[in-house]
Amino acid sequence: MTDTAQIIEDIQLGKTALGIELGSTRIKAVLIDSTHSPIASGSFEWENQLVDGIWTYGLDEIWQGLQASYREMAAEVFSKYDTVLTKIGSLGISAMMHGYMAFDQADNLLVPFRTWRNAMTEQAEKELTDLFQFNIPQRWSIAHLYQAILNEEAHVSNISYLTTLAGYIHWQLTGEKVLGVGDASGMFPINAQGTDYDETRVEKFTQHISAKGFSWQLTDILPTVLAAGAEAGRLTEEGAKRLDLSGSLAAGTLVCPPEGDAGTGMVATNSVAKRTGNVSAGTSVFAMIVLEHQLKAVHPEIDLVTTPSGEAVAMVHANNCSSDINAWVKIFAEFMEAMGQTVDMNKLFETLFNEALKGDQDAGGLLSYGYYSGENITGLKEGRPLFVRTPDSKFTLANFMRTHLYSALGALKIGMDILSGEEQVQIDKIFGHGGLFKTEAVGQKVMAAAMNSPVSVMETAGEGGAWGIALLAAYALNQKDQQSLADYLTAEVFHGKTGIEIAPDEKDIAGFEEFIERYKNGLAIEQAAVDFLK
């Protein structure tokens, strides 16, 4: 840990890096010192709004949130170190990936920002996946653009620039229309070298829409792709004043390529090297695995994106994870209160999670689906939380809790089994982060069985994506001898920080395999619940 005097010197000399990430429910700013340790932070809570059937955030709220999180971070710097923040060594912007922000030549937003959450591009998803022979999920920017073309939306003819939320903010702060390759890989497929948009697929798209007669070309309206470590511009006078309303922040700060939240999660868990990956398990669950080679087939269950340095990544994303577990724990809390007992929710979670480890490895024949929403991997358009058992199932508290932990990872495991089975993807280590890992060892042990791979949790994983983009900003500032991002993180940031690792237990692996067969066979039950429970 850096001493206070050194931190003050870093602040005064501009040896700091600032990362700001716009997540779905919170905007967070994290300032780090020359040792990459967080020294101040600020945040702003926000929620998307459903406006005319579109999930969106308003431009005014975007800037209100950015300014509020920066202001709170700068106030903490003054409070803790008695220093006014006037200069920053480097800066990075990260945000939710995908979505659709289209601007005209006068830089006006043509339609309200369409976030990743909008499931309105089903026709585009199917047609583009077939055209490209590459999985194009509904949330991708190109799917939104093509669906707007199919819908004959008038604004499409006037598009001058199309970008993501992170790309938009970076543009406003620096004047540069660029995007980190990781975020760009959620707009349009990236080439095998991980350096730019795939030229063959760009040409296919161009030919496919040629009859429409648009004045723009796809590559003219998309951001320029940059890899981690590049200088992506400098903070302009206007940008500095827009970010820091006090006027204290000087212009000229180096700004790294803007990135998506998936990429910053990889950085924050040191999982950007080949044969490594990270899994985020909370309300939803997704795994990012850095590949050694391209996949052999197109799988609708698997997205193909990249690390911030352009390495190919397979992403398995499931919409549902811990919500149903939380609901059941709340029921147990209500029971305790009804019995006149005081409830410590942390202790209750810990007790129930540890009880799960006492259950049968196959969870005793029980079955649940924690589907609060639909699940693409298992083909369910809607969800109905469901628990079911046979008369001879071993209905114990331990098996009940193990069932729900297994079920929380059920859809993820189906996708991961495609990677490890059909695609023979090798994984040396998984880094876990998120609420499922709060109870020591339990979430790791279950995840290790699901992944059939060692799972590590680091203390720093809780710092999140804002810290991840701050690290990318520091990497751009401290580039030396063409050091790779993976080497930089290992040598300069995570040296000596290995985390706590749990290897998969063979009996747990076998038990999870029995459970997942029951899970797949029972999907018709879940579908019936969707059909008949309205």
Image (cartoon, rainbow, N blue to C red):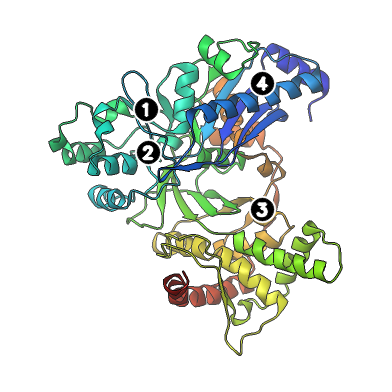
Q: Which residue is mark 4?
A: 16
Residue receiving disc 2 = 187
Q: Can you identify the residue that label 3 sits on?
A: 435
Left-right relation of 440 to 375: right
Q: Which SS class for mark 3?
A: helix
Q: Secondary structure at mark 1?
A: loop
Task: Tell me if I can see residue 60 in this picture.
Answer: yes
Dot placed on the residue nearer the N-terminal end, 3 or 1: 1
Q: Residues within 10 Å of mark 1 (few under 14, many from 20)?
A: many
Horizontal side of 515 relative to 296 (left or right) equals right
On the image, numbered disc 1 is attached to which residue? 223
Q: Residues within 10 Å of mark 4 (few under 14, many from 20)?
A: many
Q: Earlier in the sequence, mark 2 or mark 4?
A: 4
Residue 227 seen in the figure = no
Of the residues under marks 2 and 3, which one precedes in the sequence? 2
In whole angstroms, how far apart are the C-alphas of marks 3 and 4? Answer: 29 Å
- Number of labelled discs? 4
Q: Could you tell me the amino acid type at mark 1?
A: Pro
Q: Closer to the N terminus: mark 2 or mark 1? A: 2
Give the camera-side residue of 290 and 97. Answer: 97
Q: Residue at x 64, y 76 (%)?
A: 361
Vertical position of residue 434 compared to residue 377: above or below:
above
Query: As displayed, is residue 399 above or below residue 26?
Result: below
- The residue under the point 60% across, 30% down is 471
The answer to the question of whether label 3 and label 1 lie on touching residues, with beta carbons closer than 8 A, is: no
Q: CA distance from mark 2 to mark 3?
A: 29 Å
Q: CA distance from mark 2 to mark 4?
A: 31 Å
Whether the residues at callouts 2 and 1 have beta carbons within 8 Å, the answer is yes
Q: Earlier in the sequence, mark 4 or mark 1?
A: 4
